[in-house]
Image: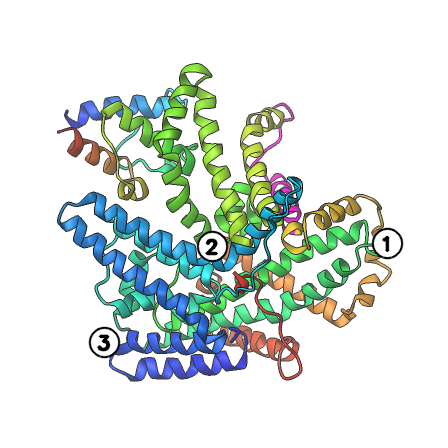
Amino acid sequence: MSVTSFYFFCMFAVSLGVYYAIPRKFQWCALVMFSAVFFVTSSDWRTGVYLLANIVVTFVVTTQIVKAKEKNKEESAKGYMLIGLAINLSMIATLKYSNFFVYNWNVLMNVMKTGHSLTELQLFAPIGISYYTFISVGYILDVYWEITEAEKNPFKVGLFIGYYPQMTSGPISRFESVKEQLFTGHKFEYERVALGIQRMLWGVFKKLVISTRAAILVDAIYADPVAYTGLYVWVAAFLFILQLYTDFSGCMDIILGASECYGIRLPENFRTPFFSRNVQEFWQRWHITLGVWFKDYVLYPVLRTSTLRNFTKWLKKHVGKKVSKQLPSYLGMLCVWILIGLWHGGAWKYILGEGMWFWLCIVLGQVLAPAFKKITTVLQIDTECFGYHLFQSLRVFFFVAIGNMFFRLDGMSAAIAEIKSGFSEFNPWIFFDGSFVNMGLSYRDQNILVFGVFLLFIVAILQEKYGEAREWMKKQFLPFRWFVWVFLYLFVLINGAYGPGYSAAEFIYRGF
Amino acid sequence: MNREKIYEKLTEVFRDVFDEEDITISDGTTAADIEDWDSLSHITLLSSVEDEFGIKFDMKAVQGLKNVGAMVDLIEASVK
């Protein structure tokens, strides 16, 4: 069940009715029930066994960690923590990465010219496994580190891990920040529900009006790399970012808006990423909860290992202070970025394009920062002026576009060939001779796409200024507010790509 | 070790880690007040503080320290 499907909105409406009709102390039970319904109707119900196993393991080990700590048995607590992580991570490793292992094993055997090759496995990873595994791993570590208390009710642990709005695409929430909201009942408040629904509508607009139209051009260009060269390649690369952003952040708007209707505010995943001045800042504004998860549960523990700390001291003594501060951090970041690449999928193109490429951009950005500072000082460039900020943001956009070509295209060689093709020809006339109409997007649809991007830009400016565009909207007088929301609703109704005979493409990040 | 003495040593650590001789810190100083204090230098800073005072921060402190005042509280409690 996609979160833009008719059935989802039906289920959501029923769940909201039930949620506010029953006594508040039972509201979380209703969410458990609707989460189960959502899972069963969204994927093969048999894969639910992995989710159940994850919940049971997480509940048992966290309970045991607490008991061991109460008896001052630190080693036992560590053992339970490691068992929990091992079981939960081995499930995702087996279901998502077995064939990546098989592929690499077979390549190695080929190189060594031995006949011990393996056959690919036919395993299906259940929906949302990357998200609920990370949520449960974070919870186990938080209990072990005493950042949060362990929940004593297994059904409440189940709800935290399998809460249906965040099940398929995140955000990756932390127990400490959502437990009160999840388990304490909420009184019906018209304004909160209205704001939630408004946010859902904006998410649907992004997905059905913008993302689906951008996808048509992207698919057409990438389907024929021989015919579409030169500037076509960059149009596709830039449109793919637009598609990905409106798809993923639109999905988040629907999820966060739906959750808000229940009175549960999940963490934000996006904060106007295209206003970023460098790639590092971009990743602090894009898929925020994934970045925070890797920072808290991978980067910090890695940087604090005795091996890396001793290495830092050795560097300080033998190489110099500056290198001793930078090199260990860059090594820790490399581990994180390889894992972020791998999180996107078991293939080298993800490790390279979504992982190491961004690591390289960030490290080079930091290493070259003093040189850039010198250049801007010599040339007397005001780095705070609008023009320079625009230049920096476009530079980030370009680097992100390159990385996402690996994400979108089939294999590393296809992405590299496409980048080369982008530099093979200069053909600016494609913007004026109607070339894009031949790709399945009529003039009308092109205009709708441009209008959608314009609205997106206006909202992004409001978000940058007020934190939330809705805050600005709340201050406007009633007729204007109603005009905007009714206009948006009708616009989606008329121009959204949905309905019988049309199957809106799945959310890109739903597959993880 | 009293709070004043802790601040004296801690200021030296901050100046060494962030390579800035005129850094001054107080209870309310946060990462937002020091230009280079990001998630990476945060770990370098904590490791240097640990070495200087002979203490060890747990992960709860690593993730949750809100400002310099909270850091000094922890140091004060650990070196007593």
- First to last magenta residue range: A378-404
* Foreground: disc 2 or disc 1: 2
Q: Are marks 3 and 2 on the same chain?
A: yes
The residue mark sitting in front, 3 or 2, is 2
Residues tagged 1 and 3 counted as in contact (Cβ below 8 A): no
Residue A386 painted magenta: yes
Q: Chain of mark 1?
A: A
Report the amino acid beneath label 3: Lys
Question: Can marks 2 and 1 be said to lie on one chain?
Answer: yes
Label 1 vs label 3: CA separation? 64 Å
Residue at the spot of label 3: A25
Q: Quadrant of the N terminus of chain B?
A: top left
Q: Which residue is mark 1?
A: A429
Tell me what residue is drawn at x 60 percent, y 44 percent: A352
Residue at the location (50% across, 64% down)?
Answer: A125
Please tell me whether residue A276 belongs to the stretch shown in magenta: no
To which chain does the residue with label 2 belong?
A
Image check: A274 left or right of A227? left
